Image (cartoon, rainbow, N blue to C red):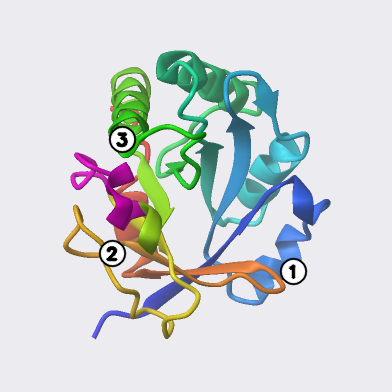
């Protein structure tokens, strides 16, 4: 039976993160918020990005999607922010946080997400994870995103047993707790996780 790899995700709300302590406690991977929309960058991102690396934690960066904006402009802003913090290395992960519709109908939200992801794939050569939650996906906001790995927020379900919404048939990362910190599991090994990340070839 495959083991569960443990991870966390952070943003500016956590302030300064002690990455060494997390690594010692068994955290193997993490995502840090990098950007939101087309012009906002998390002031702790550079520190988090480098802290993860120094602690040998599989490093992930995420963008908080604002579907009212231009997805290509938002993706460019995200990649510039990651580049300024040291860029991507082999095995690094990227995710789109899709949890607000900005008052738009589901088809517009899904189109924004698909375009953002395609831009990232084309420019960075890595397939993003989609972070979302059950009712948001069930409302149609994730149409056409089934080819991307699912990072599902489902704290009400037992660890490693989330309910999987369409268009997906399986989960890749399960956010099983959000108090006092967002905690996640990946069903597989570190090597299997980094295979889903950046490959410079």
Q: Assess disc 2: are there few (<14), some (14-19) or many (≥20) residues with their C-alpha within 10 Å of its C-alpha.
A: some
Q: Position of residue 31 (x, y in %)?
A: 55, 51
Q: Answer with left or right where residue 195 lies relative to residue 88.
A: left
| Picture quadrant of residue 118 | top left
User: Circle 2 — which element?
Assistant: loop
Say which residue label 3 marks.
110
Disc 2 or disc 3, which is closer to the eye?
3
Of marks 2 and 3, which one's residue comes earlier in the chain?
3
Q: Which residues are magenta?
A: 137-148
Residue under circle 1?
21
Task: Verify CB contact (< 8 Å) between mark 2 and mark 3.
Answer: no
Question: Cα distance, mark 3 to mark 1?
Answer: 38 Å
How far from the left and from the top, in percent, is residue 2?
Answer: 27, 80
Residue 165 spot, x, y in % from top left = 26, 62
SS category of the residue bearing label 3: helix
Q: Nearer the viewer, mark 2 or mark 1?
A: 2
In this rendering, the answer to whether 37 lies above or below 188 is: above
Q: Quadrant of the C terminus?
A: top left
Q: Secondary structure at mark 1?
A: helix
Q: Badge 1, how many Cα within 10 Å: few under 14, some, many 20+?
A: few
- The residue carrying mark 2 is 171
| Sooner in the amino-acid sequence: mark 2 or mark 1 | 1
Residue found at x 48% / y 13%? 73
Nearest-to-viewer mark from 3 and 1: 3
Residue plotted at (31% across, 70% down): 188
Image: 124 above or below 152? above
- Is 138 magenta? The answer is yes
- Whether the residues at callouts 3 and 1 have beta carbons within 8 Å, the answer is no
Q: Which residue is drawn at the image coordinates 33% and 29% (left, top)?
A: 108
Residue 101 horizontal/vertical position (percent): 46, 38
């Amino acid at each position: 039976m495959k083991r569960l790899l443990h991870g966390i995700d952070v943003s500016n709300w956590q302030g300064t993160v002690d990455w060494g302590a997390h690594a010692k406690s068994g955290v193997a991977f993490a995502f840090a918020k990098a950007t939101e929309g087309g012009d906002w960058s998390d002031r702790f991102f550079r520190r988090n990005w480098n802290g993860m690396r120094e602690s040998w934690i599989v490093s992930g960066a995420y963008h908080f999607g604002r579907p009212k904006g231009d997805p290509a402009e938002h993706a460019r802003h995200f990649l510039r922010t990651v580049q300024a913090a040291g860029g991507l290395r082999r095995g690094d992960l990227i995710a789109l946080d899709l949890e607000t519709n900005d008052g738009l109908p589901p088809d517009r939200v899904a189109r924004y997400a698909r375009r953002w992801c395609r831009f990232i794939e084309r420019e960075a050569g890595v397939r993003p994870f989609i972070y979302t939650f059950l009712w948001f996906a069930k409302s149609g906001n994730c149409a056409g995103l089934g080819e991307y790995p699912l990072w599902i927020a489902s704290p009400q379900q037992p660890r490693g047993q989330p309910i999987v919404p369409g268009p997906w048939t399986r989960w890749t990362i399960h956010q099983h707790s959000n108090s006092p910190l967002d905690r996640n599991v990946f069903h597989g090994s570190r090597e299997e996780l980094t295979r889903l990340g950046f490959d410079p070839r």
